[in-house]
Amino acid sequence: MAVREVLRMGDPRLLARAQPVEEFDTPELHALLADMQDTMAALDGAGLAAPQIGVGLQVVVFGVEQNPRYPDAEEVPRTVLINPTLTPLANDLEDGWEGCLSVPGMRGVVPRYARLRYQGFDQYGKPIDRSVDGFHARVVQHECDHLIGVLYPMRIRDFRQFGFTEVLFPDEDIGDD
Protein backbone atom coordinates (compact mmCIF):
# COMPACT_ATOMS: atom_id res chain seq x y z
CA MET A 1 0.00 0.00 0.00
CA ALA A 2 2.22 2.86 1.24
CA VAL A 3 5.24 3.69 3.33
CA ARG A 4 4.06 6.08 6.02
CA GLU A 5 5.98 8.76 7.89
CA VAL A 6 7.13 7.56 11.29
CA LEU A 7 6.55 10.01 14.13
CA ARG A 8 9.63 11.00 16.10
CA MET A 9 10.16 11.32 19.83
CA GLY A 10 8.78 14.67 20.92
CA ASP A 11 5.53 14.28 18.98
CA PRO A 12 2.78 14.21 21.65
CA ARG A 13 0.86 11.51 19.75
CA LEU A 14 3.57 9.03 20.76
CA LEU A 15 2.74 9.64 24.43
CA ALA A 16 -0.99 8.94 24.13
CA ARG A 17 -2.64 5.66 25.08
CA ALA A 18 -3.95 3.77 22.07
CA GLN A 19 -7.57 2.66 21.87
CA PRO A 20 -8.67 -0.96 21.42
CA VAL A 21 -9.70 -2.14 17.98
CA GLU A 22 -13.42 -2.86 18.01
CA GLU A 23 -13.95 -4.31 14.53
CA PHE A 24 -11.77 -6.91 12.85
CA ASP A 25 -11.40 -7.93 9.21
CA THR A 26 -12.40 -4.52 7.85
CA PRO A 27 -10.97 -2.84 4.74
CA GLU A 28 -9.67 -0.01 6.96
CA LEU A 29 -7.83 -2.39 9.28
CA HIS A 30 -6.32 -4.32 6.36
CA ALA A 31 -5.17 -1.05 4.75
CA LEU A 32 -3.58 0.08 8.03
CA LEU A 33 -1.76 -3.24 8.38
CA ALA A 34 -0.51 -3.11 4.79
CA ASP A 35 0.88 0.38 5.39
CA MET A 36 2.50 -0.75 8.65
CA GLN A 37 4.11 -3.79 7.00
CA ASP A 38 5.35 -1.67 4.07
CA THR A 39 6.76 0.96 6.43
CA MET A 40 8.47 -1.59 8.66
CA ALA A 41 9.98 -3.37 5.65
CA ALA A 42 11.19 -0.16 3.99
CA LEU A 43 13.01 0.87 7.18
CA ASP A 44 14.33 -2.63 8.06
CA GLY A 45 12.46 -2.51 11.35
CA ALA A 46 11.86 -5.42 13.70
CA GLY A 47 8.42 -4.07 14.53
CA LEU A 48 6.08 -1.12 14.29
CA ALA A 49 3.14 0.09 16.36
CA ALA A 50 0.19 1.98 14.88
CA PRO A 51 0.82 5.05 17.09
CA GLN A 52 4.23 5.43 15.42
CA ILE A 53 2.44 6.35 12.19
CA GLY A 54 -0.12 8.53 13.94
CA VAL A 55 -2.90 5.96 14.35
CA GLY A 56 -4.06 5.65 17.97
CA LEU A 57 -5.13 2.02 17.86
CA GLN A 58 -3.79 -1.03 19.74
CA VAL A 59 -2.15 -2.60 16.70
CA VAL A 60 1.44 -3.80 16.38
CA VAL A 61 3.29 -5.75 13.72
CA PHE A 62 6.65 -7.41 14.22
CA GLY A 63 8.86 -10.10 12.80
CA VAL A 64 12.50 -10.73 12.03
CA GLU A 65 13.93 -13.17 9.54
CA GLN A 66 17.38 -12.20 8.35
CA ASN A 67 17.81 -8.52 9.03
CA PRO A 68 21.11 -6.73 8.46
CA ARG A 69 20.36 -4.49 11.44
CA TYR A 70 19.97 -7.53 13.73
CA PRO A 71 22.52 -10.05 12.42
CA ASP A 72 22.68 -12.07 15.66
CA ALA A 73 18.96 -12.04 16.50
CA GLU A 74 16.95 -15.22 16.43
CA GLU A 75 14.04 -15.31 14.03
CA VAL A 76 10.74 -13.88 15.23
CA PRO A 77 7.64 -14.94 13.27
CA ARG A 78 5.84 -12.20 11.36
CA THR A 79 2.92 -11.34 13.59
CA VAL A 80 -0.04 -8.98 13.63
CA LEU A 81 -1.04 -8.44 17.26
CA ILE A 82 -4.15 -6.45 18.12
CA ASN A 83 -5.42 -5.48 21.59
CA PRO A 84 -2.49 -7.22 23.28
CA THR A 85 -2.10 -8.29 26.89
CA LEU A 86 1.38 -9.10 28.22
CA THR A 87 1.98 -11.31 31.24
CA PRO A 88 5.52 -11.83 32.58
CA LEU A 89 6.27 -15.53 33.19
CA ALA A 90 9.01 -14.72 35.70
CA ASN A 91 10.32 -11.64 37.45
CA ASP A 92 13.80 -11.86 35.93
CA LEU A 93 14.83 -8.99 33.68
CA GLU A 94 17.46 -8.98 30.96
CA ASP A 95 19.30 -5.92 29.74
CA GLY A 96 19.62 -5.49 26.00
CA TRP A 97 20.36 -2.83 23.41
CA GLU A 98 17.35 -1.30 21.69
CA GLY A 99 16.70 1.27 19.03
CA CYS A 100 13.48 2.67 17.64
CA LEU A 101 12.25 4.09 14.37
CA SER A 102 10.77 6.95 16.42
CA VAL A 103 14.14 7.66 18.05
CA PRO A 104 16.37 7.48 14.96
CA GLY A 105 20.11 7.19 15.22
CA MET A 106 20.20 6.24 18.90
CA ARG A 107 20.53 3.09 20.99
CA GLY A 108 20.18 2.32 24.67
CA VAL A 109 20.28 -0.58 27.11
CA VAL A 110 16.79 -1.41 28.35
CA PRO A 111 15.71 -3.98 30.95
CA ARG A 112 12.90 -6.26 29.76
CA TYR A 113 11.21 -9.38 31.09
CA ALA A 114 13.14 -12.40 29.88
CA ARG A 115 10.01 -14.54 29.41
CA LEU A 116 6.43 -13.55 28.84
CA ARG A 117 3.08 -14.61 27.51
CA TYR A 118 1.27 -12.41 25.04
CA GLN A 119 -2.33 -12.66 24.07
CA GLY A 120 -4.44 -10.73 21.61
CA PHE A 121 -5.96 -11.12 18.18
CA ASP A 122 -4.92 -11.18 14.55
CA GLN A 123 -6.55 -8.99 11.90
CA TYR A 124 -9.42 -11.46 11.51
CA GLY A 125 -10.23 -11.55 15.23
CA LYS A 126 -8.60 -14.97 15.70
CA PRO A 127 -7.04 -15.31 19.18
CA ILE A 128 -3.25 -15.37 19.58
CA ASP A 129 -1.67 -16.84 22.70
CA ARG A 130 2.12 -17.35 22.79
CA SER A 131 4.77 -17.77 25.46
CA VAL A 132 8.15 -16.45 24.33
CA ASP A 133 11.59 -15.48 25.53
CA GLY A 134 14.77 -13.83 24.28
CA PHE A 135 14.69 -11.37 21.42
CA HIS A 136 11.07 -12.28 20.62
CA ALA A 137 9.98 -11.23 24.12
CA ARG A 138 12.01 -8.00 23.85
CA VAL A 139 10.45 -7.02 20.51
CA VAL A 140 6.90 -7.64 21.76
CA GLN A 141 7.48 -5.56 24.90
CA HIS A 142 9.07 -2.73 22.92
CA GLU A 143 6.22 -2.54 20.42
CA CYS A 144 3.47 -2.87 23.04
CA ASP A 145 5.06 -0.06 25.05
CA HIS A 146 4.13 2.24 22.17
CA LEU A 147 0.47 1.43 22.85
CA ILE A 148 0.72 2.91 26.35
CA GLY A 149 2.73 5.97 25.32
CA VAL A 150 6.14 4.66 26.41
CA LEU A 151 9.30 5.03 24.33
CA TYR A 152 12.33 2.91 25.18
CA PRO A 153 14.45 5.82 26.55
CA MET A 154 11.85 6.12 29.33
CA ARG A 155 12.88 2.64 30.51
CA ILE A 156 16.66 3.19 30.46
CA ARG A 157 18.24 2.90 33.92
CA ASP A 158 21.81 3.95 33.11
CA PHE A 159 22.16 6.80 30.64
CA ARG A 160 25.84 6.00 30.22
CA GLN A 161 24.47 3.20 28.02
CA PHE A 162 22.47 5.48 25.74
CA GLY A 163 23.74 7.41 22.77
CA PHE A 164 24.13 7.77 19.06
CA THR A 165 24.48 4.47 17.23
CA GLU A 166 27.51 5.53 15.17
CA VAL A 167 29.34 6.61 18.33
CA LEU A 168 28.43 3.54 20.40
CA PHE A 169 29.06 1.07 17.56
CA PRO A 170 31.48 2.77 15.16
CA ASP A 171 32.47 -0.44 13.35
CA GLU A 172 28.96 -1.86 12.95
CA ASP A 173 26.28 -1.11 10.38
CA ILE A 174 23.16 -1.15 12.53
CA GLY A 175 20.20 1.17 12.44
CA ASP A 176 17.07 1.78 14.43
CA ASP A 177 14.37 -0.60 15.61
Image (cartoon, helix red, strand yellow):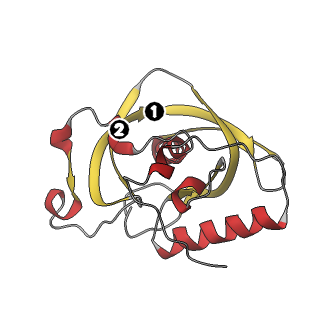
The kind of residue on which mark 2 rests is Met
- Name the residue at 45% across, 33% down: 114
Depth check: give the residue in front, 6 or 112.
6
**Mark 2 crowdedness (10 Å alpha carbons): few <14, some 14-19, many ≥20:** few
Residue at label 2? 154
Give the residue at x 68% y 43%.
19
Residue 80 position, x and y percent, is: 68, 55
**Amino acid of disc 1:** Ala
- Residue 143 in view, yes or no: yes
Is label 2 in a helix, a strand or a loop? helix
Left or right for 103, reference 85? left
Q: Name the residue furthest front.
A: 12
User: Which quarter of the rendered picture does the C terminus lie within?
Assistant: bottom left
Towards the viewer: 77 or 1: 1
- SS for tag 1? loop
User: Percent from the top left, x then y, of residue 91?
Assistant: 46, 20
The residue at the far top in this view is 91
For the N terminus, which image quadrant? bottom right
Picture quadrant of residue 106: bottom left
From the viewer's perspective, tell me whether residue 10 is left or right of residue 36: left
Residue 112: x and y, percent?
42, 34
Picture quarter containing residue 151? top left
Residue drawn at (38%, 44%), measured in percent from left and top? 152
- Foreground mark, 1 or 2, reads 2
- Mark 1, Cα crowd under 10 Å, few <14 / some 14-19 / many 20+, is many
The answer to whether residue 148 is left or right of residue 85 is left
**Residue 114's disc number:** 1
